[in-house]
Amino acid sequence: MAIRITKVYTRTGDKGFTKLVGGKKVAKDSLRIESYGTLDELNSVLGLARVFNDDLKDRLPAAQRLDEIFRRLQNELFDLGSELATPADFSYEGMFTVGDNEVKALERLIDELQKDLSPLNSFILPGGGKVSGFLHQARTVCRRGERDILRLMREESVSEWPLKYVNRLSDLLFVMSRWVSKNLGEPEYLWERGLRGHE
């Protein structure tokens, strides 16, 4: 399906409604809109991580590899958002849908990055460097997207694959945050049980 955007504002949302792919009108706070809206937020967080990684691409092979991963994930998330924006009773020629291939590709990537990492002896606190910090934020937004999609599946007909994809993606983002810490030289904060401030 060709994309042609000629006008940004349409005024159709002024009363709290928007249109899905195919033209069906739904409320802007519907579960379907909430689901792909969260994926859009996730994509934006990955975009920020990608921006901070961009300065390192010419100096570190790991940063170049990371940019390739970001590019792929951002495009896949946009495809998945489009899939979720398409009601079950509508389809179009060339429509992309997430499936087993995409989920297995995420698993292979997790395995690839995990090889470089030592086992954890504690939970990790979000933060560290700029890139890994944004990856931690992306992971939490991804988990929210997973919850949104699960709620949507209870109400509407949705394939099982978007939920599986987002579940695996959150695992990947956690591994990526650790891989970045090691390969870009960013710190990794570990949880210290029972730590309290001292007067």
Image (tube, rainbow, N blue to C red):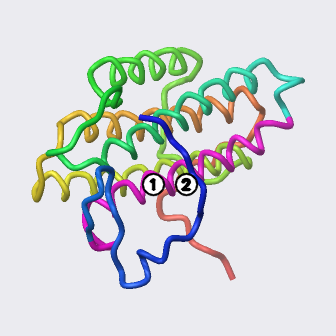
- What residue span does the magenta drawing correspond to? 27-55
Question: Which of the image's four quarters has the N terminus?
Answer: top left
CA gap between label 1 and label 2 equals: 5 Å
Inspect the magenta stretch and tell me whether residue 37 lies in it.
yes
In the displayed structure, 198 sits above or below 127; it is below
Residue 182 quadrant: top right
Q: Residues within 10 Å of mark 1 (few under 14, many from 20)?
A: some
> How many labels were placed on the picture?
2
Residue at x 10% of width, y 59% of height? 155
Tell me the quadrant of the picture where the C terminus can be found: bottom right
Q: Secondary structure at mark 1?
A: helix
Residue at image position (59%, 62%) is 7
Does the segment drawn in magenta span residue 151? no
Whether 147 is drawn above or below 181: the answer is below
Q: Is residue 160 left or right of residue 141?
A: left
Whether residues under marks 1 and 2 lie with C-beta atoms below 8 angstroms apart, the answer is: yes
Is residue 136 placed above or below 33 in the rendered structure?
Answer: above
Residue 28 location in percent, x, y?
A: 34, 72
Residue indicated by mark 1: 140
Hey, what amino acid is under mark 2?
Gln
Outermost residue toward the right in this view: 59
Give, as a three-letter code, the residue at label 1: Thr
Q: Main secondary structure of the magenta part?
A: helix
Please indicate whether residue 125 sits to the left or right of residue 39 in the image.
Answer: right
Under tag 2, what secondary structure?
Answer: helix
The spot of residue 168 in percent (x, y) is 35, 33
Q: Which residue is mark 2?
A: 137
Mark 2 burial class by Cα count in 10 Å: few <14, some 14-19, many 20+: some
